[in-house]
Image: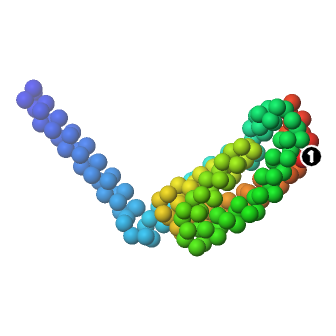
Amino acid sequence: MAHLRPVAQASRKSLASRKKQANSDSLRAIVGSDSRSNAAFHHGLEAREQMDMPKRPLVCTETLRALQESLDGEKDSCRNFVSRYVEMWPGRFERISAAVASGDNDLAMDSALSLRSSSLMVGAARLSALTDELIRLLEGRHASAARRKLASIQACGNETAGKLSATCVTADGQKEGP
């Protein structure tokens, strides 16, 4: 019986190797190398990412509190900062949208990075995450997927701006108008 062990081990290794190759072949068949397959693959990733978005808060109140604290607890300073973010939202989106539409990847990337940073500062968690996805698409030079991502960014940005306009959270957790 001892003489069969090496054969059984070699058989298991061979089976594992064949499974690994089959999985790799399946992945190549799914992803492929043509643009339609890549688009379908990225569309699947986008769908999964979209399902995770509602789990992120539209506006993170802890971040707003931290912003106010970093401004020495000045409610007016915090309110002004948030109001300025809201005022700048349409222009920021327009710059990203125009850059993506024209194929100016560098300008699109610069504008998206700016939106992500400012969104993080005001606690716009969902918009920041969507913008992060756009940045990954731009890094990968996936222009059509980046164009498709703009609709969800615009909708989320509009919703976020509305919520931030309606509410400003103070350091002690009290809600006040901006």
Q: Residue at x 31, y 57 (%)?
A: 25
Left or right side of 13 for 146 = right
Left or right side of 8 for 174 = right
Q: Name the quadrant containing residue 161.
A: bottom right
Residue beneath disc 1: 177
Left or right side of 128 for 2 = left
Name the spot of residue 113 as percent of width and height, x first: 61, 53
| Viewer-nearest residue: 74 or 134 | 74
Does the image show residue 45?
Answer: no
- Secondary structure at badge 1 equals loop
Q: Residue furthest bottom?
A: 102
Name the spot of residue 119 as percent of width and height, x first: 70, 49
**Callout 1, which amino acid?**
Gly
Q: Residue at x 59, y 68 (%)?
A: 100
Q: Residue furthest left?
A: 3
Asked which colour scheme the image uses, the reply is rainbow
Name the spot of residue 158 as percent of width and height, x first: 77, 59
Does the image show residue 135?
Answer: yes
Name the spot of residue 21 as percent of width and height, x first: 27, 52
Which quarter shows the N terminus? top left
Q: Residue at x 75, y 44 (%)?
A: 122
Q: Is residue 151 above or below residue 10?
A: below
Q: Residue at x 86, y 30 (%)?
A: 172
| Viewer-nearest residue: 159 or 102 | 102
Tally of numbered tags: 1
